[in-house]
Amino acid sequence: MASARYTIGISVSSPPEQELIALGLSEHHIRHVFIELVRHILASGWDVAYGGDLRPAGYTEALFDLVRTYNRRDVAGPERVRSYLHWPVWAGLTPKDRADLANVATLVEVSAPPGVDVSDGRVRDDPLTITRCVEAMRSRMTAEIGARVVLGGRTWGQGGITPGVVDEANLAIAGRLPVFVAGGFGGAARLVAEALRGELPQELTSDFQREHTPDYDGLGPAGNASAVLASVVERLQRAGLAGLQNGLEDDENARLMETDDADEVVALVLRGVRRLTGAAASPPE
């Protein structure tokens, strides 16, 4: 397994459809950028990490399909791709599932956090328990990667206090990891970009989340949802562009936060990582 310094974690999910339509985009564009990022990161010799579930037609499946294609070309193997799975997703894998995935990715099975009784079948369906397990996965992934790219992401209706892609950006910045914010495709990455510019997106207010996210105040310890969300926003606002520490100049980061050109996103991310690692430029395949 490559050094974490050369492992790039990608945070992605689909933004609200209405926002994509307003931008003249679709989920296809998000998936295209995701695939192009993974393809060029692997072709440049770095590794990829992704945390998610195994739902059909999801981003994990798209990642695995790409790696299968690369395997046939002897470009990337399972040791180059880490798939972080939270409990109980990995607990439901059959021996056949594991055999099928062995040639695609290295599965990182993150245990449930202390205090979660995994022998109690009822906790598998408890939203707060699942939220805690996802948080454990995100924390471990943050500790084991070298940089983070955030793209798209839902802005409400998530399973935790903070939209997932925002939460992963916040963890990375708190951990002083290089962060690349591809905000031009909307969604949670746009919210991160706005907060880094000192703004307060309405989607990152507790009033908005209470209105749009079911049982919002029950997604964390009693009574602290507003305080947790406010602390995330405050950290992003304080960090600013300087807090990204990603090798890009301010004008380059500003462009990355605005562009909806997939090639430009890939070029800017690769430029930043090359500066961070001192790697020579590799021609795209």
Image: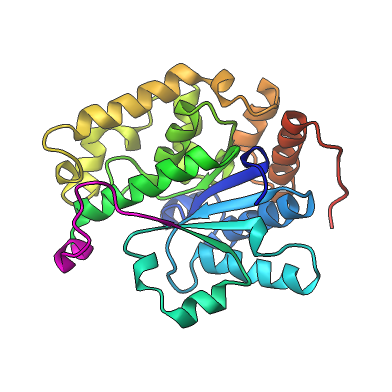
Q: How is the image coloured?
A: rainbow
Residue 48 relative to residue 55: left or right: right
Residue 159 visible, this orientation: no
Give coordinates of residue 281: x percent, y percent: 86, 40
Q: Is residue 280 above or below residue 266?
A: above
Residue 249 lies in the magenta-colored region: no
The extreme bottom residue here reads 96
Q: Looking at the image, is 55 positioned above or below residue 145?
A: below
Measured from the top left, where is residue 279 in percent x and y?
81, 36
State which quadrant residue 94 falls in: bottom left
Q: Quadrant of residue 168?
A: top left
User: Magenta stretch?
Assistant: 109-125
Q: Residue at x 48, y 29 (%)?
A: 175
Name the foreground residue: 232 vs 64: 64
Residue 148 placement: quadrant: top right
- Which residue reaches farthest left? 222
Q: Does residue 224 appear to the left or right of 52 in the view shown?
A: left
Percent x, y for residue 183? 55, 39
The answer to whether one can see residue 253 in this image is: yes
The residue lying toward the viewer, choosing from 194 and 134, is 134
Q: Residue at x 15, y 64 (%)?
A: 120
> Which residue is pictured at 35% across the width and 54% down the height?
111
Q: Quadrant of the C terminus?
A: bottom right
Q: Residue at the location (81% across, 70% down)?
A: 73
Task: Give the percent coordinates (x, y) of residue 270.
Answer: 74, 40
Instruction: Tally the marks.
Output: 0
